[in-house]
Image: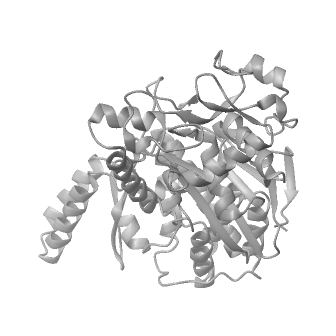
Amino acid sequence: MLKIHNTLKREKQEFKPIKPGQVSMYVCGMTVYDYCHLGHARVMVVFDMVYRWLKVSGYEVTYVRNITDIDDKIIRRAGENGESIHSLTQRFIDAMHEDADRLGVQRPDHEPRATQFVPEMLNMIERLEENGLAYQAADMDVNFAVRKFPDYGRLSGKSLEDLRAGERVEVDANKHDPLDFVLWKHARSGEPEEVQWDSKWGKGRPGWHIECSAMSSRLLGEHFDIHGGGADLQFPHHENEIAQSEGANRCRFVNYWMHNGFVRVDNEKMSKSLGNFFTIREVLGKYDPEVVRFFILRAHYRSPLNYSDAHLDDAKDALSRLYTALKNCSGHCEVDWNEPFALRFKAAMDDDFNTPEAVAVLFELANEVNKGQAAAAQLKALGGVLGLLERDAVAFLQGGNGGAGDDAISARIQARNEAKKAKNYAEADRIRKELLDEGIVLEDSAQGTTWRRA
């Protein structure tokens, strides 16, 4: 029985899909004006894990992760670069896909772009206006009237007074209430034509929050199972999604809300202002992508994830131990779900996707490999459920950390192998010692030579 921690209810709940055997899931994706950072990596990997486990559990899953390709930051960055909005966003969409592919993240079933769903957004705003929940202000923007939606604050667990006191709320004389948020932005002077659409309220473009409501309702229906995203989106973005979706459609929006924890760097929240901001590409320049994926999954998705080189090095060593247990195991392996280790793995995953406990089962299996190849096959198969341990073990162990210096190390190992073949053992020993002095430990076996950092 799968249980999911529902942010809306603040507790773990038994998962019961709206349609038996089918799951509809929407996750807030990236705003594409720059390269993806570690916070994006965590969202992608976490909900890829959820997607995989739901399918392993026998559900037919429709997974939607959107792309925000119209936004103030996008317009500003394109202007600074002297390029079109489309050129900028397409470049970073391509980069996002490259990063996700390297991390072993499967593509969602649908990846809608906000600019493709403007008619749906306009339709939803019109319904909100008809239902008395939207108004056009003196500055021509169309806003959502928060105080006219009785359940506002349900997701964050705060009253309107709490929210006004505790959040940085923009003071705007055009709004009826400081918490009111924009649904439709009137066209600003100097903005390019490609970000202006016609509407009954004049030319303009959608606000950020309405994008997700319109895209999710169009692709999954007005009421669906799971909505996910980073903890930073809980308020105001997801709170606003509930208000405008339920205000327009007059029905429940989402049954289960899932939020992954923040990424921290040396115990401080990652942010550009603190100068501790890392893109996925920067990290993958030093570490193998599977090491990064393993690092993310070794923590529970709701816990803070503390990034540091020491933690990545530890993750690399741990993943190498699992691959070392698979040196003599190759090919595709199927999980035996009746076997005790698999049953414990399943129990962990069914308990709100408890990947730390599931990974602990993998290490216990690795300790059993010397007792027989059945344990190795089970280890490889269960790792595959998490998108791990799917490569050739010897190739992974020879590949090191995936950083820029690995090719040079591999070349020296190859030179040592050639020296051994030529019976030039003095040269072979010299290369081994040289690598050892640099902290590179070689391990010879019948399958070849692998290396690890000491």
| Relative image position of residue 245 (x, y in whole percent) | 74, 48
User: Is residue 365 in sight in this rendering?
Assistant: yes
Identified at 59% across, 37% down, the residue is 201
> For this rendering, which residue is in front, 348 or 209?
209
User: Is residue 300 in sight in this rendering?
Assistant: no
Residue 298 horizontal side relative to residue 78, left or right: right
| Relative image position of residue 414 (x, y in whole percent) | 20, 68
| Relative image position of residue 241 (x, y in whole percent) | 71, 44
How many numbered marks appear? 0
- In which quarter of the view is residue 419 placed? bottom left
219 over 187 or under it: above or below: below
Identified at 65% across, 39% down, the residue is 233
| Relative image position of residue 70 (x, y in whole percent) | 47, 43
- Where the N terminus falls, by quadrant? bottom right
> For this rendering, which residue is in front, 434 or 297?
297
- In which quarter of the view is residue 109 placed? bottom right
Residue 269 horizontal side relative to residue 166, left or right: left
